[in-house]
Amino acid sequence: MVVVPAQPGDRVSFCSRHGNPVTYTASVRFRSRPSARLQTAVAVLVVAFGLPVAYPAARYLDDPDPELYLLLLGAGLFAGWLAHNIMVKLVDVPAWGFCPACRARRANLVTAATICFVLVPVPCALYVPVVLPEQVGEGELSTLAEAVRWAVVAAPAVFAIAGVVLSAYARWAVVAGGVAGRNGTTVEFRRPAAQFAQQVTGQAGPAELG
Ligand SMILES: [Zn+2]
């Protein structure tokens, strides 16, 4: 692992991911990686306690209610996200160097994330022609309508989560492959390109090879 001070004195001339010459700089916000177990534990606890508290009948799984479970899942994810934000350390670097391959990687991920977000409302369009007429009418929902109802609830969430994940990978800090140190003054690279590592560790100062 290579540790770089948050404000390196000399400009590094190779990108950290590919080791290509730097052709572009962007201001980058590196984030630390707080304990994933702790975040997961918070999310699981919220869901586990929320289920019987929010809706006692939900303990009896013979009447699944998709909207309720999605709401609880959302509450759990929100709690995990909140725990993450409380623990995370940020390190801002005004001009971090990237190569054309880095920019292409980011552009592709941004495109993929945009497609996912655009797809979010598409399943909802099925609700009106398939489910609504049966809900307004009397009698049980048909199997098709029931399946569409589940899909309408679940698919947008899947697309939204995929979009959020792709957006996270599209961040400059992730393209660079760096993570803020937990003390908030350094940036750590687990698998940097050789040229980058060589230049950084060759410089005098607090840079060190871990
Ligand atoms: Zn690169």
Image (cartoon, rainbow, N blue to C red):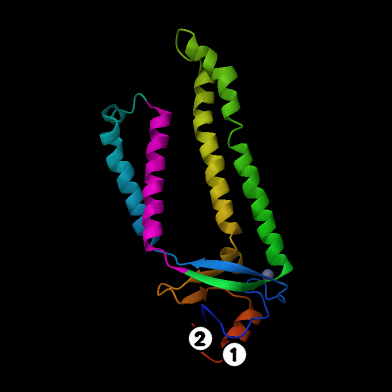
Instruction: Indicate the secondary structure of the residue bearing disc 2.
Output: strand
Marks 2 and 1: in contact by CB < 8 Å? Answer: no
* Main SS category, magenta section: helix
Residue 33 is inside the magenta segment: no
Q: What residue type is labelled 1?
A: Gly
Is 181 located above or below residue 162 in the figure? below
Q: Which of marks 1 and 2 is nearer the N terminus?
A: 1
Q: Position of residue 191 (x, y in %)?
A: 57, 73
Q: Which residue is drawn at 38% across and 42% down?
A: 75
Q: Disc 2 marks which amino acid?
A: Glu
Task: Judge whether 164 appears above or below 185 on screen.
Answer: above
Q: Residue 189 lies in what quarter of the image?
A: bottom right
Picture coordinates of residue 187 (x, y %)? 50, 75
Label 2 belongs to which residue? 208
On residue 161, the disc is none
The crowd level at tag 2 (other Cα within 10 Å; few <14, some 14-19, many 20+) is some
> 154 or 185: which is nearer to us?
185
In-front residue for pair 7/172: 7
Is the residue 155 above or below the residue 98 in the image? above
Identify residue for label 1. Answer: 202
Span of residues in magenta? 64-90
